[in-house]
Structures are given as C-alpha cells and as structure tokens.
Image: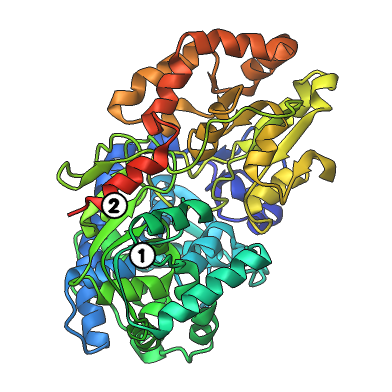
C-alpha cells in the first residue's frame, strides 16, 4: 500500500509532491490531482448524532468550567451566572476542536500508513473575547496550524497513530491573528444623540419596566416602542460600549499560572475529553480570567435597573453586557428574541438561549424551545416594498467559515465553501448581456478568507460595498441568495428571488418542509448553478411574468406570512411588551 501524506495547510501542499489526503478545501494550492483525496465531511458524519454528542459535551464542560472558574476567582456563583458568561464561546470552541479532531481520527481509521509533518507545539496570546476567537478560528492560518498540531501531537503522544512516518521539514506560518475591532460607523447626528442619552442615563439610577436592547429594531421603532411604554429610550451599544473594555483587557498581563491548570486530571474513556481537559483553560478568553475583575467592576457601576430585558444580539459578543446581565439575573427576567429569519430545525448554539432565558421570542414555530417559554411575534422590520429601479442580477453571497468552527443548522452549512465554484460557473455560462448586469453583494469583512477568494474572480465594479441591502434590492431585477435566512426573506418579500444552496444543508422546521418542496417545484430553489444558469438565460427577459405566475399560487405570501402576516408588526410588539407579566 502506498504511503499517503496528511495535508493540514497550503504550506504543506507546496512542500510534498506524493499522494496526499487533504483535510479540507483550505489545504490545496492548485487544482486537485486525480490520485489525491479530500476528506468529505458529509460522507463521514451523521449530523444528528454529532449534534447530540456536542450538545452533551457542551453541557458537561459548562458545569466543569463553572466550578473551576468559581475556584480561580474565589467566587460562589451559580451555574446560570457562568453559562451567560461562557456563551457563546463554549459553543464555538468545542465544535471547532471537534471538527478537527474528527477529521484527523476518521482519516487515521481508514489509512493504516500515513506520513505527516513533525509538529512543534506553538502558543498564542489568549483572545480578549468570544468574537475575536470566532474571527481567528475561522480565518487564521496560524491559529489553525496550532489547533491541528495539538491534536496530532496529542494522538502521537497517546499512541493513537498506527504506522506513522514523521517528516522533519519546517514550514513558516506567520502570525496572522487579527484583533477584532468594531468599525461600524453610525450617522454622526444619530451617534451623538445616543451618546448624550446614554451618558445621562448612566449618571442616574434609572428605573425601567423593560430595557429594550438595540438589535433588530430601527432607531425610529426603538424610540416608538419605549415611548409607548412611557419610558426614556436607552441605547445598549452606548451604555455597554465594547471599546470601553476591549483595549483595557487586551493590555492586561497574562496569568500563566492559572492557564497551566488542567481542567480535570481524571482520565475519561472518551479521549476527546482528555484532549479538551489539557487545553481548554489555557484557551479561555481573557474576559473570563484576566479581565474578570475589571468587567465585574464596570458592570456593577452601570446604574440601570429593570424588571425585564429584551435582547437580540448583545448576549452573544458584548462581554460587558453579559457581565451586567449575569450579576442581575436574580432581579430581572430575560427575554431573548431571534435576530434573523432562520427556519432551520437545529439551533446553532445548542438551545442554550432557551435555557438561560425566561421567555424566547421567535418569528417561526421553534422546534427546540419549550412551549412555556416560547412567544411568537412578527419579524420586526418593514419587509414589504416594491423595488424602484429593477435592472441588475444581484448575487447575495453567504461566506462560510474558511476554517470550520460553528456546528448547527445542518451538517455542512458552515463548512462547505461553494460560492467560488458557483460564481465561476455563473461567470462562464451566463449570457454576456445578463452577466453585464451581474453584481455581487457581500456584507462580510474583507479579512474573511472565503470572501478574499471570491474577490479574485471579478473586477471591483462587480462588487457592491457600503450600500444598505434595501438600496441594493431597489436596483435588483432578480436576486440570487445563497442562504435561506434574513436576506432571503427581505429579498423575496420585495420581488423576484432565487435560492442557490444544498437543500440538505438547510433543513427547515417540520411544519415548513412543504414550503421548501414547493419552492423547488416552482424554480425558486436550485442546488446547482448549471440548472440555475439555464433558467436565468431562458427567463431573464420575462422574469416578472414568471414571478407574477408564482405569486398567483400564493406560496410566496405563505412563506412571508410565517414571519410577518401584518405589515403593522410594531403594534403586536407594543401589545406584548405592555401586557408582559
């Protein structure tokens, strides 16, 4: 049997010329040769079994870490306190390690003779917060080399590699970890208004019935909601300003003594647990170790009192907000609202939101949320409008994670980078007159490696940047959406829209399966660019006729009504908040 070389990065690909097994799309520099293999996640994994295993693992480590963090900080906080602070980092970290662990172990099981690069364990500075970790895990070649090297080293150390040949060659990978910065800018007048109001609020002990965080509501709607409750509007992004703590925490000295701690010295039958135990404390973000005291002080100085709190995003990546929330859990009731138009059955964060909240607001029927907690309200944005100047073919690009991290929604949704191949096919096969009007819409960071690869395909004029999605829709004759979530809803509610993605990667809740089937029947959903291109070339001149014919079948209204039956969505939100008990 010929020896195969395990490739974990592009740097190895360029150094080794013989038969190779690639861990993923990020590993090869050029076109794949026939005698080489790429690990296929779908063929080797059962989504539901993995999801169940990861959910159980996250639950167990939530308990272990809560106990250990109480010891480290000399605290006696309950499990819910730490669950709020560990979310969503724990739901990023454990799946990220699991992806890499499973890939390597699956390859080991099927290949009895392997060559691989002899690894040297490197270190990295702990991340300041959860979002910084997510960005680096999905984009940094340096960090991923560390993660893969750890697993290989651990398996060799524990004699889990069969016949392995270690090749002693060096590859140079520069530290490309980028520090997260919130660069989103608001209009100057709006920003000043929010700052003034929030500064005044923080100087007094303000009593509010419901603290409504920023998120899905427009500033106008947020003001109107607060006034309907006879309370002064507050702006969560100004009160819980990320810039007020990110720099301070990142400048703190690393507590190496704490980070040397092994979470549990007791050996588990599950060797993956033993691997996690060895590294998880050293990998905890700084806000949970070095920055714990600083954030506790800042949180306790915020003079905001409320009976209820309604949150959309802040419980994810605003660590100051999460500390304030954790310290006030016993005196307030937490209402967590969905922040997008997903109708997928399995939540990407393993149902933690339903556990930590008192009420969970969803726009669709939620298969996972307990009935006693679940509240159904309409999607809180205006989505029904007519496009003003429909001329362009707009491709709304979903940029998956270049390196895998999150696990949820489906087996492959976050792992497969198909946009490059899809766009290459569209560029090649669309009629020239249609391609002339083709534009790519992308809201993701230029630092995202998946986006960078796409940017190489077209000239700059093909990309739409710094334009709101609503304004982009105004100019779209037809929109191609690569993910059936918020932008798909906003697009289909305004005019002709097509979905391009793997159906099995975006499985909907049970009561919405029929709608997805109808979308496929009526050519609203495609799973390959060849069929899509033929359809567009044939129907471009008469797209409106095709769309009007579908509208007569009422399937589009049926889909929109799942999220928002009445355009006057704000009235239902007002009624709910006024009568909440």
Q: What x and y, as percent, mark residue 535?
A: 66, 13
| Quarter of the image that includes the C terminus | bottom left
Question: Which residue position is annotated with label 2?
Answer: 577
Check disc 2: other Cα within 10 Å, few if <14, some if 14-19, many if 20+.
some
Secondary-structure class at tag 2: helix
Residue under the image location 26 percent in, 86 percent down: 72
For residue 375, what is the image quadrant?
top left
Q: Give residue 196's position: percent from left, percent from top.
A: 54, 76
**Sequence-wise, which precedes: disc 2 or disc 1?**
1
303 vs 339: above or below? below
Identify which residue, 259 or 355, lies in the foreground.
355
How crowded pointer 1 is (Cα within 10 Å; few <14, some 14-19, many 20+) is rated as some
User: Is residue 435 left or right of 26 when viewed as pictured?
Assistant: right
Query: From this viewpoint, is residue 455 visible?
Result: yes
Indicate which disc residue 231 carries. 1
Is residue 218 in view from this perspective?
no
Identify the image quadrant of residue 393.
top right
In this picture, residue 370 sits left or right of residue 248: left
User: Exactly how many numbered labels are in the figure?
Assistant: 2
- Frontmost residue, 290 versus 145: 290
Q: Which residue does the image show at 49% across and 80% down from the upper left?
A: 199
Q: Position of residue 374 (x, y in %)?
A: 22, 44
Cα–Cα span, label 2 and label 1: 12 Å
- Image height of 545 relative to 497, above or below: above
């Amino acid at each position: 049997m010929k020896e195969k070389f395990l490739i974990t990065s592009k740097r190895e690909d360029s150094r080794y010329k013989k038969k190779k097994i690639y861990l993923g799309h990020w590993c090869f520099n050029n076109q794949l040769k026939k005698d080489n293999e790429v690990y296929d996640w779908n063929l080797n994994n059962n989504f539901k079994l993995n999801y169940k295993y990861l959910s159980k693992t996250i639950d167990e480590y939530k308990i272990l870490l809560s106990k250990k963090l109480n010891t480290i900080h000399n605290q006696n906080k309950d499990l819910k306190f730490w669950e709020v602070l560990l979310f969503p980092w724990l739901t990023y970290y454990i799946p990220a390690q699991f992806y890499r662990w499973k890939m390597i172990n699956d390859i080991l099981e099927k290949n009895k003779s392997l060559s691989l690069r002899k690894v040297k364990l490197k270190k990295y500075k702990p991340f300041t917060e959860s979002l910084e970790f997510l960005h680096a895990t999905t984009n940094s070649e340096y960090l991923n080399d560390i993660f893969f090297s750890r697993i290989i080293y651990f398996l060799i150390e524990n004699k889990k590699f069969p016949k392995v040949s270690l090749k002693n060659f060096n590859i140079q990978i520069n530290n490309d970890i980028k520090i997260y910065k919130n660069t989103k800018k608001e209009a100057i007048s709006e920003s000043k208004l929010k700052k003034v109001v929030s500064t005044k609020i923080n100087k007094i002990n303000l009593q509010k019935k419901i603290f409504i965080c920023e998120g899905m509501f427009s500033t106008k709607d947020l003001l109107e909601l607060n006034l309907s409750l006879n309370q002064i509007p507050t702006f969560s992004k100004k009160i819980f300003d990320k810039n007020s703590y990110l720099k301070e925490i990142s400048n703190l000295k690393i507590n190496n003594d704490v980070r040397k701690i092994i979470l549990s010295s007791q050996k588990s039958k599950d060797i993956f647990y033993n691997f996690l135990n060895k590294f998880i404390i050293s990998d905890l973000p700084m806000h949970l170790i070095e920055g714990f005291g600083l954030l506790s002080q800042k949180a306790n100085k915020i003079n905001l009192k409320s009976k209820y709190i309604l949150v959309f995003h802040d419980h994810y990546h605003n660590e100051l907000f999460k500390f304030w929330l954790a310290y006030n859990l016993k005196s307030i009731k937490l209402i967590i609202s969905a922040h997008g138009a997903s109708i997928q059955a399995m939540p990407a964060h393993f149902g933690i939101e339903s556990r930590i909240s008192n009420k969970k607001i969803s726009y669709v029927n939620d298969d996972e949320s307990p009935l006693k907690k679940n509240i159904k309200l309409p999607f809180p944005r205006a989505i029904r409008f007519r496009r003003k100047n429909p001329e362009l073919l707009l491709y709304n690009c979903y940029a998956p994670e270049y390196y895998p991290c999150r696990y949820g929604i489906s087996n492959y949704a976050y792992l497969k980078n198909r946009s490059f191949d899809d766009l290459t096919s569209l560029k090649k096969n669309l009629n020239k007159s249609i391609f002339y009007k083709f534009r790519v819409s992308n809201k993701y960071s230029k630092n995202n490696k998946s986006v960078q690869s796409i940017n190489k395909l077209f000239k700059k004029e093909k990309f739409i940047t710094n334009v709101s999605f609503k304004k982009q829709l105004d100019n779209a004759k037809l929109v191609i959406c690569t993910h059936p979530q918020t932008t798909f809803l906003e697009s289909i509610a305004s005019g002709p829209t097509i979905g391009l993605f793997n159906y099995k990667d975006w499985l909907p809740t049970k009561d919405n399966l029929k709608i997805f089937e109808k979308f496929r029947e009526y050519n609203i959903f495609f799973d390959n660019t060849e069929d899509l291109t033929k359809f567009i070339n044939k129907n471009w001149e008469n797209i409106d006729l095709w769309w009007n014919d579908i509208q007569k079948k009422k399937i589009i209204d049926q889909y929109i009504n799942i999220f928002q039956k009445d355009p006057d969505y704000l009235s239902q939100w007002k009624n709910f908040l006024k009568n909440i008990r």
